Image (cartoon, coloured by chain):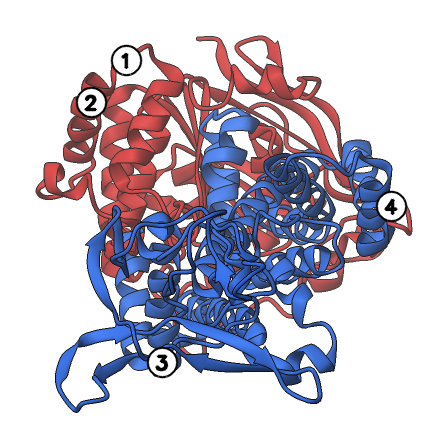
Amino acid sequence: MSALLTVDRLGVSFATPDGPLHAVDGISFSLERGAVLGLVGESGCGKSATASALCGLLPPGARTAGSARLSGQELTSLSEPGWRSIRGRRISMVFQDPMSSLNPLLSVGEHLVETLRTHQDLSRAAARTAAVEWLRRVGIPDPEARLASCPHELSGGMRQRVMIALALCPGPDLLVADEPTTALDVTIQAQILDLLASLRRELGMAMIFITHDLGVVERVADRIAVMYAGRIAEEGPAEMILAAPRHPYTRGLLDSVPGFRPRTGRLPSIPGTVPSPRDWPSGCRFHPRCPDADSTCRESAPDAPGSDGGAACFHPVGSP
Amino acid sequence: MNHALRRFESVLSANTPARVSFWVLVALYLAAIFAPWLAPYAGDDESRACSWAPPSTIHLRELDGSWHAPFVRAVSYSFDDDARRVWTEDSSCRFPIRFLVHGRLLGLDHPVVSPVVGRDAPTGRLYQQPGRPYEPAGRLYLLGADARGRDLFSRILYGSRVSLTIGVVGVAISTLIALVVGGIAGFAGGWVDGALMRLCEVVMLVPAFYLLMLLRAALPLDWDSRLVYFYIILILSFLGWAGLARILRGMIQSLRQSDFIAASRALGLSPWRNLWRHALPQTFGFLSVQATLSIPGYIVAESGLSLLGLGIQDPQTSWGNLLEESMSIAEIRLHPWSLLPGLFLFAAVLSWNLLGDALRDTFDPRSLS
């Protein structure tokens, strides 16, 4: 099966007065048609910059390096008009905060009708019917009545359902979900995850699911890529990564989730914070926080995971 | 939008000055619309015999003590030792105030006589038509008369049509320009933004009043007043948009960073659609406040121009050129009612300001409950 999305040494840098800031520094992965990749990492490790680069939503002044190809079409060199033929109908996106992602002045129906009519040649009435159908599919009760509701009249979970309907109605091949459940409370999180998972299966769509929550990624992802400081630390099938992490960072993340692995005593945490892109550490970027680091780690950078996964580490967990 | 209307209603009901202002403005604008019907006389209907006649005294009782419907008497003047007019009522006649006569709300009964006034040589009495003896003619001056005996109340009503609309139309035009320029500059960014903002700065640098005087001096003085009216609106609004455009550009720039704009970009909407449908409507609350608060400025600017004789010219009226007659203190002492157009101006400007404050409360997020 040919890959839907092939990302090869993708870099994202932002122009600053002190020179370029490399937020994403050469990441590679590929995504099969209909598969789900969980992109995991702490805040500031480059997850959202990756998502923005894949949707062409980087702010002006940001530059990309390397390549990202969607069914063979290069994305990094697209112009703004070129992106418009991609966004929505090929790659769509769900954002983190449903509170601010809907235009407060437009009703739910107006949002949906507008998006539907942007991508399909529909009459107003036909778009309205389709909008009701989409609201029903994302599990909004009494969809006809909800069409006239404004965003402020809906709960956070309802708004995220509307956002999902908006993102899916153009029929994209790939959905980029940037922390879609982070702003919701836990019970709603589970509902939204189940909804995303079932709709994704139904539509046969691929998804990149970005989160910092390993408990969430476990529910949806086929493969997991763990990002740290602008690079991929470890990549592989979800069950392998969760059951037997090879990279000390992945292990640290898993250990710090309560109830994920059997343990006794105090909940461990990874000391320190993600370094700023302004001064990435030399060698392996995780070495200042790594319990197993030695002089090799400080001096040279480990190889990135290959196409079949693996950990970018000189001393993977479980090795002698 | 319904939500905003409901909020505006509740702000008005809590804010008495704003509520009064609202109804004052409604009354003023209705009066402007129905001016030809409400005014007892046409704007240029003059009566030289009644030059500077004071407001008419409205009587209910005849000299013999009998009661009548409200009526006025004919008045005439002579001069005292200091050459001031002394007005006397002609008690031999009675002119009842009629409603719905000559197609107007109120007026006097007698036919409007073409006013040719002279003095009959043998008798030394005034006549109205050559060869005809003088007949006393009553005139209804609710707010007094001007130098040519024209009814000030009627002229204020006709003048309000200019003074009250110039602000609204002018603000509408300048807001539209500001929306287009500010919207494009804020959304496009880059050199487009730079060029448009420099243009704004150049426009803001122009001292508006002097430019207006210069332009008026350069244009023909015998222009029709309607043409002058449009020209004043155009000039005022072409000078007024720049500041607003700069603020809008800033608002659009920050809106462009907002999540829902990014979301609709990610859903494949075109930048134009994003600008018109998603970004600009977010500024309408601010715009309506801003527009309301800048209407008084336009009203005052037009009055200033007309006062200086650069705007609307006699016989057409605006509140500004009506005030032209009360520019010297001597005139004000002799006939203080010539200041009354200023009172209307004051009421309109104050009301618009208070209403603008109420609108600001409506859209102020801190006052949202």
- Shown colour of chain B: blue
Q: Position of residue B330 (x, y in %)?
A: 72, 81
Residue named by callout 2: A130
Residue type for callout 1: Leu
The quarter of the image holding the N terminus of chain A is top left
- Which numbered disc covers residue A122? 1
Residue type for callout 2: Ala
Q: CA distance from mark 1 to mark 4?
A: 56 Å
Residue type for callout 3: Thr
Q: CA distance from mark 3 to mark 2?
A: 73 Å
Q: Nearer the viewer, mark 3 or mark 1?
A: 3
Q: CA distance from mark 3 to mark 4?
A: 45 Å
Residue B200, quarter of the rendered image: top right
Mark 1 and mark 4 on one chain: no
- Shown colour of chain A: red
Residue named by callout 4: B214
Q: Secondary structure at mark 1?
A: loop
At 8% from the left edge and 42% from the top edge, which residue is drawn? A142
Mark 3 and mark 1 on one chain: no
Pointers 1 and 2 in contact (C-beta within 8 Å): yes
Pick out the residue farthest to the front. B122
Chain for numbered disc 3: B
Residue named by callout 3: B57
At 52% from the left edge and 50% from the top edge, which residue is drawn? B116
Chain for numbered disc 4: B
At 19% from the left edge and 17% from the top edge, which residue is drawn? A126
Res B101 seen here: yes
